[in-house]
Amino acid sequence: MDGLIGILRTQPEIALFLVLSIGYAVGQIRFGPIQLGGICGTLIAALVVGQLGIKLDDSVKNVFFMLFIFALGYAGGPQFFANLDAKGLRLGLLCLVEVVVVLALVLAATLFLSLDQGTAAGLMAGAATESAVVGTATDAISKLALPLADIQQLQANVVTAYSITYVFGLIAIVVATSQIFPLLLRVDLRAEADKLWKTMGGGGDDTESASAVPEMVGRVFLVTVGRGRSVGELTAMFGGHASIERVMRRGQSLKVEPTLRLQAFDQVLAIGKRSVLVNVAELLGREFANTTAFDAVVETTEVVVNRREWFDRELHELGAPLPAGVQIVGLARDGNAMPLLHDVKLQRGDVLKLYGPVIDVSRALPLIGDRVVESTHSNISYAAMGILLGVFIGGFSAKIGGIPFSLGTGGGALLTGLAFGWYQSKNPHRLSVPPEAWRS
């Protein structure tokens, strides 16, 4: 045991990853309705391992703090700027009330319990479960005109108080929001969440699973009752929710045009919404399974709206210029799913999900904007530039009443994270940092 402790003390980077490993494993354990999660689990593991007298270099802490704050701002950037309106300002006022109340409680506890600055800062960070306060307070304490030993003690007190109060703060928030508040408001939280999810266009409960009955399908019909009808007539009957993509007659593929009239025993490939195609057999004839003559390939892709002519235009207006075989099956704004309502007004940066034959989709993309880039690779230059700019901005200070004020490393990285995250949400066709990177 002594040998292991000696290794951890001489090579603290081993202890760092040991804490991460143990912490995230502990965080997955569920205690009834409560699950600590990776952050809280890592915190507990760090407290235990930290008792062995292992210390990490301050530069390591600063680097991880900058990454954390930048990622926090990057994730919240789209919602932050999207809520800068009258409704968002009302929510901002509610947040201001929360900040004032938390500060008042911490100041009262500091006065009555005679807490030092470090313990008070840690108390506020842990009780409000605001991990960013730890780095900000530690950075501010390092600039105080105090002996080095006192600064180190105050910084240690920040972490100690935070570690103790974070667990209680986390449990209190979980219990209050999931049990107490719904009881006081007399609402079924799960039912209300499901209702909101469906209103916003959500599907099944498991977002990672695929439906056994997909919304968009392709089916082949043998024309009997539909002989004499034109492709244009059928398209009008479908109401824009399905289209005729291929017509085979005596083994030959015909050019699909609105004026083309179907004959008996034509084979027709229709693509569109399942709810529409289930009734197509009544219009055309029976469905059959032999689709070897139809090699049409369909795809689902996303496109960002950045053509000026579509800004502030209603969604249904897109139907006319798009190829007949292309269906709009999804709409997202600032990372949130939006209901597919006809009168929804498009905004710059909206992401539309298109479904249809590959050829038709490729023709539709330039009419709307640019294809969204889907990649698991991060643009390190983009992220590093944001953090570098944030640290640079945080270094500026101004004296007010003889007291120097500055954003600090945390404030600067948060500011640039917000700006860079907002820019990425408006330009998802440009490769930057995927969600999986900043969430982790």
Image (spheres, grey):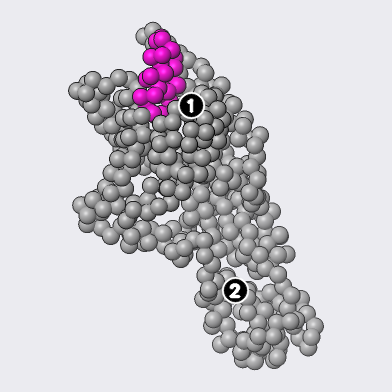
Foreground of the two, 261 or 416: 416
Magenta residues (range):
133-159
Disc 1 marks which amino acid? Lys
Residue 256 seen anywhere in this rendered image of the structure: no
- Identified at 65% across, 45% down, the residue is 377
Residue, disc 1: 55
Farthest-out residue, right:
252
Q: Residues within 10 Å of mark 2 (few under 14, many from 20)?
A: some
Q: Nearer the viewer, mark 2 or mark 1?
A: 1
Q: Quadrant of residue 83?
A: top left
Q: Is residue 150 magenta?
A: yes
Q: Sequence order check: which comes first, mark 2 or mark 1?
A: 1
Which label number is shown at residue 217? 2
Question: Could you give the CA–CA distance between mark 2 and mark 1, rounded to whole angstroms?
Answer: 59 Å
Residue 60 position within the rendered picture, expressed as x and y whole percent measured from the top left: 54, 28
Foreground of the two, 206 or 356: 206
